[in-house]
Amino acid sequence: MKSIPVVLSFLTNAQRRRNLLVLGKLVLTFALLVVVFAITFHYVMAWEGREFSWATGVYWVLVVMSTLGFGDITFESDVGRVFSVVVLLSGTVLMLVLLPFMFIQFFYVPWMETQAAARAPRSLPAKTAGHVILTGLNAVEATLIRLLNRSQHPYVVLVSELAEALRLHDEGYRVMLGDLDDPDTYSRARIDQAALVVTARSDTTNTNVAFTVREACESVTIAATAASAAGADILQLAGCNHVLRFNDTLGQALARRIVGRDAKTHVIGQFDELLIAEAAALHTPLVGRSLRDIRLRDHVNVNVVGVWDRGRFQIAGPETCIQATSVLVLAGSRDQLDAYDALFCIYERSDKPVVIIGGGHVGRAVAATLDQQGIDYRVVDRHPDPQLDPDRVIQGDAAEFEVLRKAGIMETPSVVITTHDDDMNVYLTIFCRHLRPDIHILGRSNLERNTSTLHRAGADFVMSSASTGANMLFNLLRSAHLLLLAEGLDAFRIPMPEALAGRSLAESHIREATGCNVVAVVLDDSFDANPEANRPLPAAAELVLIGNPESQSRFFATFAVPPRTC
């Protein structure tokens, strides 16, 4: 029954109309042959001295043409037998054409199209709402889909080619068939009920998409990527709410995480009034001691959320031991972080220039951010960009020791590897770690899967272009309640679970049971960063927690979180 609407729609398609015309010609040819052969049958039988009815003639023709050959009526002369062979061959050829054509075009093709329509629909159900519409599936969007799936947020990928849509569906993606430059595509994708439209293609394609989407719906939020400043301006004119330049953001994020130059805090994210910062432990009294012994909360009331160690994040506990390679993840207010800085500002590590390997978009963004902070740097590149300060550029191959030595690799506290080739980044990471076992290495990977490879090669911190872009887009979608700080580290804000209301943090054992850290309690307009462990939690308050995806899942499985009423 599902094939009936598809069969009835044949007349609306030029190819289907041509197929119907071919079928008509084949049926007409078959009917003419039956008539001609039936008439010839009577003449040959009369020539042999026998007579049969017209119905018998048609019966004989159909039996012979279909190759059934009952044998109840046969010719006795050679002329009759030759005629029988002609009828048999004509019927065989015609049946080999007519029957397969009818089966394929009127049964198999409709069935296949019905199956394809189910796997790659041309519209979304009317009840679809709050979904994210993606116009492609590159590395950034694939990573974003993983984040959306993790938070159980609906999405759809628009695909213009049926074969590609079916392939993506078979790989587990939710797709919809439609042209990106057609306003009707977005209407069928329920654009008026969508939460966000993401387009991360070329600047020109993104402009066309944004303009088309804005024509279909004036209120939906549109986020697009831009490769240049000029492209960003045009995209805003086309109707984009957010224009993101991932390479610039990645470079700025890497620059913020250059912690090897001192022991002070460096803010990496902000959740309302709560600041998330990182601080290196090397050359400080923290090395070799546990958090229980250090008692930072007693001195500066700052919360140690976790510890990075060569790319591995560990949720902090009282017995967590600080190593020379450790980078502390701290949570607190501005005053609390300033108190930490006042305590550790005396442990200056180095004023030597930071070495940046690679002078592309990301490398230039790192250099510009360091320049704004008044930090000296040296850029190593084979073909340096004219935009870079020539006095801070070392031209040459970073794989050669003499070039790196000239850039200051043997004295610098940190090196940032930013080339666009993941294989080269792994190579240079191993080389730099061999030259300087104590150096702080930050790396950039284009593909998310190479992040762990760079960590194994010796990088202390790695950011992927895909993860950075996906995190930015996801934070746009859920910025009020969830903040992705880094790969595997989130801050999220939730209403107070009923099971925790009236109990203190010490009584609840949230960290021990789930692995999440409560870093703030929000009550009305009051924001209490690092609340007292023995203070009862108000039922009307909200909690701000930090943890990885696994600890979040354990938290929601342990405590029933009420829905947000705002």
Image (cartoon, rainbow, N blue to C red):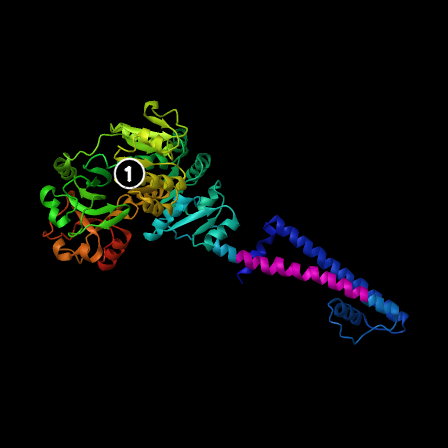
Using residue 95 as the reference point, say whether residue 132 is left or right of it.
Answer: left
Frontmost residue, 151 versus 361: 361
Q: Position of residue 348 (x, y in %)?
A: 18, 33
Q: Residue at x 28, y 33 (%)?
A: 410
Q: Is residue 559 magenta?
A: no
Is residue 244 visible in this depiction of the protein? no
Q: Position of residue 340 (x, y in %)?
A: 14, 39
- Locate residue 74: give its quadrant: bottom right
The quarter of the picture where the N terminus appears is: bottom right
Q: Residue at x 32, y 45 (%)?
A: 455
Q: Is residue 113 magenta?
A: yes
- Locate residue 367: give its quadrant: top left
Magenta residues span 85-114
Is residue 450 visible in this depiction of the protein? yes
Q: Position of residue 232 (x, y in %)?
A: 39, 32
Q: Secondary structure at mark 1?
A: loop
Q: Outermost residue toward the bottom? A: 72
Frontmost residue, 544 versus 21: 544
Image height of 38 relative to 455, above or below:
below
- Dot 1 alpha-carbon crowd within 10 angstroms: few under 14, some 14 to 19, many 20 or more: some
Q: How many marks?
A: 1
Q: Residue at x 69, y 56 (%)?
A: 24
Q: Outermost residue toward the top? A: 391
Magenta region, main secondary structure: helix
Q: Position of residue 378 (x, y in %)?
A: 31, 29
Instruction: Identify which amino acid the numbered label 1 is placed on.
Output: Arg
Using residue 418 as the reference point, say whether residue 70 is left or right of it.
Answer: right
Residue at image mark 1: 436
Frontmost residue, 62 versus 483: 483
